[in-house]
Image (spheres, helix red, strand yellow):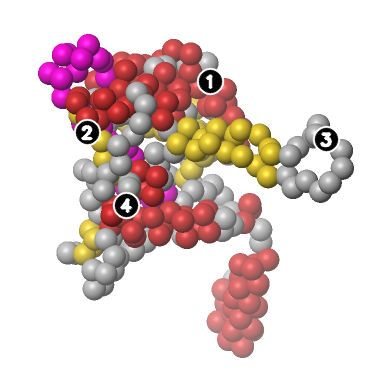
Amino acid sequence: MLSGIFIERPRLAIVIAIVIALAGVIAIFAIPIAQFPDIVPPQVTLNASYPGADAEVVETTVAQPIEQQVNGIDNALYYQSASAADGSYILTVTFALGTDPDINTVNVQNRASLAIPQLPAEVSRNGLTIRKKSAALLQVIAFYSPNSTYDAVYLSNYATINVIDPLARIKGVGQATLFGPLDYSLRVWLDPDRLTELNLTPNDVIAAVQSQNIQAALGRIGAAPHATGGIRRHRSARQSRWLGDPHKGRGAGGNERKIAGPLQPVQRRAGRGDRHLSDPRIQCRRGSAPSA
């Protein structure tokens, strides 16, 4: 029998085993990644946000219109969606093995675009984020300050600016996500009784804030047509009333500056505004130290 040949000739068996081992090592570096078999079905995620809405409102106004349009996509195996109390919505579509993730993403995007006219204005303004991803989680990295020198907001912004984008550019990385990003936003506290006395609604306050948060391009100084002769310098002019800049939102000494215009009576009599985290309920810690 064939096994008897290797038993009677141990040197031949050792040589063949070494050759097979060397061939396997060479194959690891020579075989392209695309030739490895797919063991995890490709997925496409759709994210939406409806600020101020609870889970039931998100389910009725966001989830149902989107899922009615997305249902029935080619090669889709099953759907999984979640509506959270913070106004966020995520839909995960799992496709069959062997399908092209890019084609799957395009199909989901085309179907989701049909539901945009049915969504609330706030959701349409924030947009729908559609990405392909793998169900396998590669790695989780925690940033923390051992001596508590930096707080969670600093660590979150550091990871967003210096870490997320370089990680996403690495070959083979489908998506790099920061869990619980601590983003800043303008938070306005309203007094319902004062709003009633002033005959105002929350929409009036929102419109007043939006009217103050603008960056308008006013053109160029010294641009053509102009009188001939002489040397003219071209400079751009810009009018900025951007509430996102902390230096424009505060006066000397760090005191809150009164905003002129339609927001001024609201700020003085109907409520107050401050610059705070968009979602203060998010907390990330590693042991007892804040982290991101």
- Residue type of the residue flagged with mark 1: Ser
Q: Which residue is mark 4?
A: 252
Q: Which mark is residue 101?
A: none
Q: Residues within 10 Å of mark 3 (few under 14, many from 20)?
A: few
Residue occupying the far bottom of the picture: 11
The quadrant where residue 220 appears: top right
Q: Residues within 10 Å of mark 2 (few under 14, many from 20)?
A: some
SS at circle 2: strand
Q: Residue at x 69, y 39 (%)?
A: 221
- Out of 216 and 251, give the one closest to the viewer: 251
Task: Please state the horizontal and vertical placement of residue 31, each as a whole percent of the image.
Answer: 66, 61
Residues in magenta, as a range: 177-202
Q: Which residue is mark 1?
A: 113
Q: Are marks 3 and 2 in contact (CB under 8 Å)?
A: no
Question: Distance of mark 3 from mark 2, alpha carbons?
Answer: 50 Å
- Out of 162 and 66, give the one closest to the viewer: 162
Is label 1 or label 4 in front?
4
- Out of 264 and 28, give the one closest to the viewer: 264
Does residue 70 belong to the magenta stretch? Answer: no
- Residue type of the residue flagged with mark 4: Ala
- Residue type of the residue flagged with mark 2: Arg
Is label 3 or label 1 in front?
3
Q: Which residue is mark 3?
A: 227
Q: Residues within 10 Å of mark 1 (few under 14, many from 20)?
A: some
Is label 4 or label 2 in front?
4
SS at circle 4: helix
Q: Earlier in the sequence, mark 1 or mark 2?
A: 1
Q: Residue at x 37, y 26 (%)?
A: 261
Task: Please state the horizontal and vertical placement of residue 159, each as a whole percent of the image.
Answer: 41, 58
Q: Are marks 4 and 2 in contact (CB under 8 Å)?
A: no
Q: Which residue is mark 2?
A: 272
Q: Is residue 257 visible?
A: yes
